[in-house]
Image (tube, helix red, strand yellow):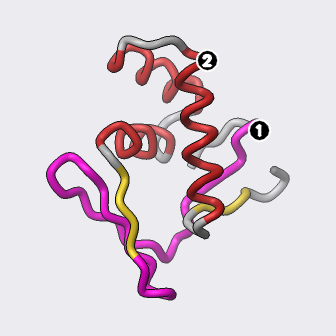
Amino acid sequence: MDADPNLPYRLKPHLLLQRVAGETVILDPESGRYYTLDEVATRMIELFTSVSLEETLSAMVEEYDTDIDTVRSDLEALLESMAGQGLVEREEGG
């Protein structure tokens, strides 16, 4: 994951992700728990795990016709929530 120093997270490697009807189901095989991401959160994570933070923010602003501050705040909240569930971890040096 190409993360900005302000958002130094990455998905834990053991997670299993599957897209279902525009949403993402995340299975943590270690705990047996599963989680779902809605369409917007799915797109955020899809972008965040494949391009830079700035590219993620720009794409979300364009695709959802919103402002960059809202997108950044929503992404930070999503990552913090996922960290609280043990789905993401801080990268080294972050």
Q: Give amino acid for label 2.
A: Asp
Is the residue 39 above or below the residue 89 in the image? above
Label 1, secondary structure: give it.
loop
Compare marks 2 and 1 and give the one earlier in the sequence: 1
Residue bearing the label numbered 2: 69
Q: Which residues are magenta?
A: 6-33
Q: Nearer the viewer, residue 37 or 2?
A: 37
Give percent across and percent down for residue 28.
Answer: 45, 78
User: Which residue is at 64% across, 60% downward?
Assistant: 83
Give percent across and percent down for residue 71.
Answer: 53, 25
- Name the outermost residue toward the right: 93
Is the residue 41 above or below the residue 87 in the image? above
Q: Nearer the viewer, mark 2 or mark 1?
A: 2
Tell whether position 26 is magenta: yes
State how far apart marks 2 and 1 are (Cα). 17 Å
Give percent across and percent down for residue 53.
Answer: 59, 31
